[in-house]
Image: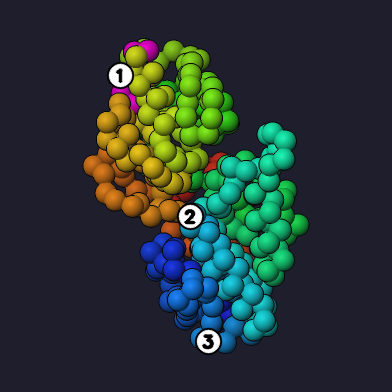
C-alpha cells in the first residue's frame, strides 16, 4: 500500500511557476532538483533527495527553447538511474505537436520523435493537456492521460449568459473542440475555413454559419502568431458578429502576436497557464490549469480513474 511520502514532485526551470501552483493544490512541496548550466550551454540534472521506489512526477512544458525538452529528459534519466519506482512526465504543453504527420515529402514527424525520445529516456507515463491532434496519444506505447481544457473553460463560462452566444472554430481542425462547447451549452456552431500559402500566414478565410448579431466565442488549442485568430475575429465582425472573444489553451504568442491581439477585433482572449505570458496585456486573461493537474497527479498516485477528470459534466472548481 502506497503512502503520500512515496510521491515526489519536481519541476524544470521553465515550468516552475506552474509547478508551484500544482503542489499548493496537491499539498506537498516541490522536490529538490539542481539544474546546472555550464558555460557552453550544456546542462546537468541532479536530484538532491532519494527517489528510490517512489512515484516521481516531473512537471515541464516543452515550449521553446528546446533546452526545456533536454532538461526534462535529463531529469527523467536521473530518476531512472536513481531507481525511481514509477516516473510520470507532466507536460502541460507538448511541444512539436503540430508536426503530427507527413503533409509533404521529406519532412520530419516531430511529435512522434519527441514521443520516442521520452520513452527511451525511461518515462512510464505522460500527462498532458489539449494535444494538437488526439492521435498523438498513439505515438506512445505507454499510458497517456490527455486532459481537456474544457474542464477549466466550460465552468468558467457557466456563470455567464450564453443565450446569444455561438461558438466558432478559427479553422477546420478545431471544429471538434468548438462543437463540444456548442453541444454543452446548446448553442450554434460556426466554422472559419482558412487557406494558407505558407506557415503562420493566412491567405484566405471563409465563414460557414450565421453570426449576425451574435456574441461569438472562438475555441482553439494553440495561439501562436495570432494571425489566424485575429483574421477570424475581423471576418466575424464583418459578417455582423456583435462581439468576438477567444478561449485558447496554449498561449505560445510568438512574433507579432501581442501587437496583433491589441490591434484586433477581439474583446478578450482567455488562455491557461501551460505557457507563461511574455508580457501582460489588458486583453489577455489567464485561467490556471494547476488544480486540474494536481487532481490528475493524485488520481495517478492513488490508482484512481483519470476519466473522472475528462469532461462529461465539468467540475466547476477546476476553473478557480
Per the model, the C-alpha gap separating discs 1 and 2 is 36 Å
What residue would you read off at disc 1? Answer: 242
Chain part drawn in magenta? 239-244
User: Which badge, 1 or 2, comes first in the chain's sequence?
Assistant: 2
Which class describes the residues within 10 Å of circle 1: few (<14), some (14-19), or many (20+)? some
Magenta: main secondary structure: loop
What residue is drawn where x is 35% and y is 31%? 245
Measuring from the top left, give residue 298's x and y in whole percent: 54, 66
What residue would you read off at disc 3? Answer: 49
307, above or below 298, in the image: above
Q: Secondary structure at mark 1?
A: loop
**Quadrant of the frame with the N terminus:** bottom right
What residue is drawn where x is 41% and y is 62%? 18
Measuring from the top left, give residue 33's x and y in whole percent: 49, 79
What residue is drawn where x is 39% and y is 18%? 235
Q: Secondary structure at mark 3?
A: loop
- Specify whether 203 is left or right of 104: left
> Residue 266 falls in which quadrant of the image?
top left
Mark 1 against mark 3, which lies toward the viewer? Answer: 3
Amino acid at each position: 500500500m502506497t503512502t503520500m511520502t512515496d510521491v515526489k514532485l519536481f519541476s524544470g526551470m521553465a515550468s516552475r511557476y506552474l509547478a508551484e501552483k500544482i503542489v499548493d493544490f496537491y499539498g506537498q512541496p516541490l522536490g529538490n532538483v539542481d539544474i546546472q548550466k555550464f558555460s557552453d550551454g550544456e546542462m546537468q540534472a541532479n536530484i538532491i533527495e532519494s527517489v528510490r521506489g517512489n512515484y516521481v512526477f516531473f512537471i515541464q512544458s516543452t515550449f521553446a527553447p528546446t533546452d526545456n525538452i533536454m532538461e526534462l529528459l535529463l531529469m527523467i534519466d536521473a530518476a531512472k538511474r536513481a531507481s525511481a519506482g514509477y516516473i510520470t512526465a507532466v507536460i502541460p504543453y507538448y511541444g512539436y505537436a503540430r508536426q503530427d504527420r507527413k503533409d509533404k515529402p521529406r519532412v520530419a514527424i516531430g511529435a512522434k520523435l519527441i514521443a520516442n525520445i521520452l520513452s527511451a529516456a525511461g518515462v512510464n507515463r505522460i500527462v498532458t493537456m489539449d494535444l494538437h491532434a488526439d492521435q498523438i496519444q498513439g505515438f506512445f506505447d505507454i499510458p497517456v492521460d490527455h486532459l481537456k481544457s474544457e474542464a477549466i473553460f466550460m465552468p468558467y463560462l457557466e456563470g455567464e449568459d450564453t443565450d446569444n452566444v455561438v461558438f466558432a472554430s478559427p479553422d477546420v481542425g478545431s471544429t471538434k473542440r468548438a462543437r463540444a462547447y456548442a453541444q454543452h451549452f446548446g448553442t450554434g456552431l460556426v466554422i472559419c475555413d482558412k487557406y494558407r500559402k505558407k506557415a503562420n500566414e493566412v491567405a484566405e478565410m471563409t465563414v460557414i454559419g450565421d453570426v449576425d448579431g451574435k456574441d461569438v466565442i472562438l475555441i482553439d488549442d494553440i495561439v501562436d502568431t495570432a494571425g489566424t485568430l485575429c483574421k477570424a475575429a475581423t471576418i466575424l465582425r464583418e459578417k455582423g458578429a456583435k462581439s468576438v472573444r477567444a478561449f485558447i489553451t496554449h498561449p505560445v504568442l510568438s512574433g507579432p502576436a501581442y501587437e496583433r491581439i491589441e490591434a484586433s477585433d477581439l474583446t478578450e482572449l482567455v488562455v491557461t497557464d501551460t505557457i507563461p505570458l511574455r508580457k501582460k496585456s489588458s486583453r489577455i486573461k489567464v485561467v490556471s490549469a494547476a488544480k486540474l493537474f494536481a487532481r490528475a497527479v493524485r488520481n495517478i498516485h492513488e490508482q484512481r480513474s483519470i476519466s473522472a477528470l475528462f469532461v462529461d459534466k465539468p467540475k466547476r472548481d477546476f476553473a478557480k
